[in-house]
Image (cartoon, rainbow, N blue to C red):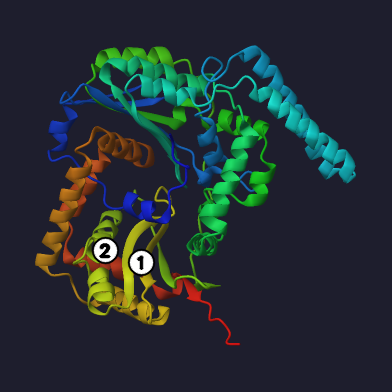
């Protein structure tokens, strides 16, 4: 009923393509927007669209793997899983008995951790582990599986889902507009009265996700090492899924403490788009979400990645498909140059006629696929623009790298033609309008810009900036940021089998 919580490489590439904008002026659009901050600091953006009797609900929580510290990496994603487990009235047959059983689980787990740190003998630890399993079974007797999702499905809800990435954790689904109050009750309750039931079972699920997405996948292994090499200081270097040793040690108590620190009203942005009455909706939002206690904001991320002085190389030898990747440091989504980087992404990888696809895939046939996009692994803070390609059979990563380098050099020394620039802008605007045609697409984009830039209106400002780009702007940005001595290069090299 929900995502695994990790945006895969392919999905991430799609998610970070240029953001859409409604086909109208900001002044016109604002007439349909109601914006408010609740008494506890939670920010709300409401957009009226009466085309159909439905509404899309997005709760964007400003916490992702970038907010984690060593020892609890992966906890943002793990908590996303737990947010679907229900509350004291959703997902249990006996809240009081379950609470006591869960407390017993926590006590035994703490004993196990103490015994391991103290070097207790294996027999004593094994005895505690058996008691731990029995305690979990006892707590599991009270669980009503997937009740949260079944309530939403029964009432006509669709698209119940969530995702966690480096920058955020986002919860969303759609409901008939006359069920808006149901969303408010469910969504506010899971953060006001959530119960972290089946925590250790779900932790095992997340560890299996890590095995599937990273440890058993060559591209997953390369990307994790590539990111860790690209960022030596900034917490972007931490994987969203977390390190296995951290996942093995994170406790339910750790998750509760993390929740209390980060899931506070001031860290949440709610956007509702659809067939709603703004005044009535605001009154209900205050009644339900106003219950969430305001708290002091957690410490911000203050680490700044040091200026890169030398090229870095990550090479993975594997029997699988060869693959090439290169990343250049770029500024965050708030920077004035970000729209130009988005336009370069469209120029290089926006469809079959884009430069990388035409050069590497169609003409030279040295790659099966190729692309580029800014904001990897996130864009709230300065990150990277990456270029990547899947090397074709009979060709080498060196050929791919040379072709990619030539296309990047071309950006620096050969201005984009006016015809090509106009085509890029038209295509970007079409993509944006198409995405924002859905209530959910609009809600998601407004929530992202509100959280990352401080004002949802910057979604419109980004498009205005793109419309105003010149060929000289693209040339300048390519020259300034695509510097070889600052880049990180990654590749999967096919392992050659020895002849017998």
Q: State the residue at coordinates (57%, 43%).
A: 206
First in sequence: mark 2 vs mark 1: 2
Pinpoint residue 413: horizontal percent, then vertical percent: 24, 77
Quadrant position of the N terminus in the picture: top left
Q: Do the residues labelled 2 and 1 touch (CB within 8 Å)?
A: no
Judged left or right of residue 399, residue 430 is left
Judged left or right of residue 62, residue 257 is right
Q: State the residue at coordinates (52%, 45%).
A: 65
Residue 310 seen: no
State how many labels appear. Answer: 2
The mark closer to the camera, 2 or 1, is 2
Residue at the far left: name it.
419
Q: State the residue at coordinates (38%, 70%).
A: 390
Question: Along the line of sight, which residue is nearer the eye, 99 or 135?
Answer: 135
Crowd rating for badge 2 (residues with CA inside 10 Å; few <14, some 14–19, many 20+): many
Residue 273 seen: yes
Judged left or right of residue 388, residue 364 is left
Pinpoint residue 209: horizontal percent, then vertical percent: 54, 48
Residue at the far front: name it.
500
Q: State the residue at coordinates (54%, 56%).
A: 214
Residue annotated with mark 2: 349
Crowd rating for badge 1 (residues with CA inside 10 Å; few <14, some 14–19, many 20+): some
Q: What element carries label 1?
A: helix
Residue annotated with mark 1: 481
Judged left or right of residue 353, residue 6 is right
Quadrant position of the C terminus in the picture: bottom right
Q: In this view, does 284 lie above or below 50?
A: above
The label shown at residue 324 is: none
Pinpoint residue 311: horizontal percent, then vertical percent: 48, 74
- Residue 355: image quadrant is bottom left
């Amino acid at each position: 009923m929900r995502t695994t919580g990790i945006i895969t490489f392919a999905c991430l590439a799609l998610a970070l393509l240029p953001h859409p904008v409604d086909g109208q002026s900001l002044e016109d659009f604002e007439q349909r927007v109601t914006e408010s901050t609740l008494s506890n600091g939670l920010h709300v953006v409401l957009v009226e669209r009466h085309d159909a009797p439905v509404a899309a609900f997005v709760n964007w929580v400003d916490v992702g793997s970038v907010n984690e510290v060593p020892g609890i990496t992966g906890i943002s994603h793990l908590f996303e899983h737990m947010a679907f487990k229900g509350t004291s009235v959703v997902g249990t047959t006996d809240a009081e008995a379950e609470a006591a059983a869960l407390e017993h689980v926590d006590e035994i787990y703490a004993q196990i951790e103490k015994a391991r740190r103290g070097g207790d003998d294996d027999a004593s630890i094994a005895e505690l582990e058996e008691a731990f399993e029995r305690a979990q079974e006892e707590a599991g007797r009270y669980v009503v599986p997937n009740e949260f999702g079944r309530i939403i499905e029964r009432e006509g809800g669709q698209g119940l889902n969530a995702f966690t990435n480096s920058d955020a954790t986002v919860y969303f689904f759609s409901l008939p507009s006359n069920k808006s109050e149901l969303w408010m009750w469910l969504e506010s309750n899971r953060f006001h009265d959530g119960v972290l039931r089946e925590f250790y079972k779900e932790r095992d699920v997340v560890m299996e996700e890590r095995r599937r997405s990273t440890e058993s996948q060559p591209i997953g292994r390369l990307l994790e090492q590539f990111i860790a090499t690209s960022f030596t200081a900034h917490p972007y270097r931490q994987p969203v899924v977390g390190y296995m040793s951290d996942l093995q040690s994170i406790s339910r108590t750790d998750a509760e403490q993390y929740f209390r620190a980060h899931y506070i009203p001031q860290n949440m942005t709610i956007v509702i788009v659809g067939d709603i009455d703004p005044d009535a909706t605001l009154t209900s939002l205050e009644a339900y979400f106003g219950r969430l206690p305001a708290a002091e904001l957690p410490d911000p991320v203050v680490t700044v990645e040091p200026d890169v002085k030398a090229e870095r190389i990550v090479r993975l030898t594997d029997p699988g498909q060869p693959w090439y990747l290169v990343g250049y440091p770029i500024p965050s989504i708030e920077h004035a140059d970000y729209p130009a980087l988005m336009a370069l992404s469209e120029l290089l990888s926006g469809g079959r006629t884009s430069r990388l696809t035409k050069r590497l895939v169609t003409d030279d046939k040295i790659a099966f696929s190729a692309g580029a996009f800014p904001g990897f692994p996130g864009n709230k803070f300065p990150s990277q623009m990456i270029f990547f390609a899947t090397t074709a059979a009979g060709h080498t990563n060196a050929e791919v790298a040379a072709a990619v380098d030539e296309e990047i050099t071309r950006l620096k020394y050969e201005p984009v033609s006016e015809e090509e620039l106009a085509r890029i802008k038209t295509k970007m605007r079409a993509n944006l309008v198409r995405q924002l045609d859905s209530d959910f697409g609009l809600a998601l984009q407004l929530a992202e810009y509100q959280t990352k830039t401080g004002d949802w209106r910057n979604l419109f400002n980004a498009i205005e900036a793109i419309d105003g780009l010149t060929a000289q702007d693209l040339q300048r940005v390519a020259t300034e940021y695509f510097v070889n001595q600052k880049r990180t290069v990654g590749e999967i090299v096919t392992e050659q089998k020895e002849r017998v």
